[in-house]
Image (tube, rainbow, N blue to C red):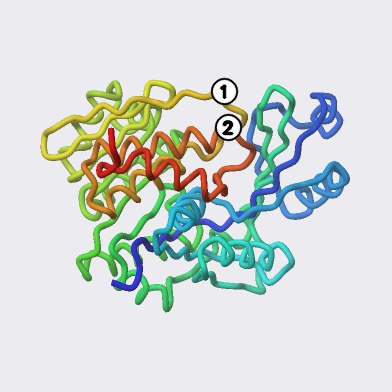
Amino acid sequence: MDNDVAGLGNALVDALVRVEDDDVLTALALTKGQMHPVDHGRWSEIYAHLEERGIELHPGGSCANTITALALMGARSVFCGQVGDDEMGRVYATRLASACGGHALHVTTQRNTGKCLSIVTPDAERTMLTDLGAAVELPHVGDFAETIRGSRLLYVTGYLLLGGPMVAATWEAMDVARAAGVPIALDVADPFVVGIVKDALWKVLREYASMAFLNAEEAVALTGLDPEQALDTVSETVDLTVVKLGAKGSLIRHQGQTIRIAPHLVDAVDTTGAGDAYAAGFLYGWLHEWPLGHAGDLGSRVASHTVRQMGAVCRDVPVLQDCIAAADPRSPA
């Protein structure tokens, strides 16, 4: 195989900025803690207003976060999405390539690059403005089909099924993987995604996926059951199910066995991306054929280091290597 993981996702530039108090949000007519869908013009207006405070830019989107973390841990992972032919798109491509050694991005002249501006107040609450832009307009996977065929896993998220041409591209990618015998992992993504495309998610679980990641809220939304009962239900359709329970750890179900993973509790600075980080750590262990308890422990460790910092990806490679060493089943107890 040429790659460990091929990821298809919505390519969104993560723009992170700290503000001194809630007055900034009030002045911008933003509701604290909410995600505000906006167009390119409104997004650019607020970005310009906050730019002097210093804004961090990173390649983001849930799938890209997981693929980037995997690459930083040493896995051969490649991300496909779509950006615009603009400065934000060039920033995205350059920084993704720096972390992953390359990319499979499509570029369009028809839409601006998608982006999410996260305004972080001193209490670590995030208020977000999202312009999906080109991210959801990918019409097909193109040459990425060969990348999928040459990978050990295809990783997708529920966000891809929300609308736009990307929906068709997602089914195409999963059809390619299924025909080639490449396993598919689905991260359900968010309770609001379940509320909109529950039937499509169940179709993926029943007909395509061999691995599923959910958090507690997503598990309840998908099944109407508590997380442990949801684990039973989802496990009837996929070979391997992971339910993330935040500060309570996680549950893994495989071949009728349930494994409980303890959390690694820290003082959280920014919890965004914790689930993406967990998936990256878990998949690293899975790729190396670790016992699933060790893979889950690595997921928990990587997630804990991610929430201790600003940004959805822990980019400190020595820290990630320490996490791997601590979770590795071959390490001394």
Asked if marks 1 and 2 touch (Cβ < 8 Å), the reply is yes
Q: Residue at x 35, y 40 (%)?
A: 198
Separation (CA) of disc 1 from disc 2: 6 Å
Residue at the front extreme? 332
Which residue corresponds to mark 2?
Answer: 308
Query: Label 2 crowding class (10 Å Cα cut-off): few <14, some 14-19, many 20+?
Result: some
Instruction: Classify residue 78 by image quadrant.
Output: bottom left
| Residue type of the residue flagged with mark 2 | Arg
- Is 185 rendered above or below residue 135? above
Front-most of 35 and 251?
251
> In the rendered view of the protein, which quadrant contains the C terminus?
top left
First in residue order: circle 1 vs circle 2: 1
User: Which residue is at 31% across, 62% downward?
Assistant: 174
Whether residue 226 sits left or right of residue 80 in the image: it is left
Q: Residue 221 or 102: which is nearer the viewer?
A: 102
Q: Residue 188: x and y, percent?
A: 38, 42
Say which element carries label 2.
loop
Q: Residues within 10 Å of mark 1 (few under 14, many from 20)?
A: few
Residue visible at 54% across and 51% down in the picture:
61
Q: Position of residue 223 (x, y in %)?
A: 28, 30
Q: Nearer the viewer, residue 316 or 250?
A: 316
- Residue drawn at (75%, 49%), measured in percent from left and top? 43
- Residue 59 or residue 144, whichever sits in front: 59
The residue pinned by badge 1 equals 267
Residue type, mark 1 in image = Asp
Picture coordinates of residue 107, whole percent (x, y)? 60, 73
Mark 1 element type: loop
Q: Residue furthest left?
A: 256
In the shown orientation, is residue 74 left or right of residue 12? left
Pick the quarter of the image with the N terminus.
Answer: bottom left
Give the side of residue 55 with respect to residue 8, left or right: right
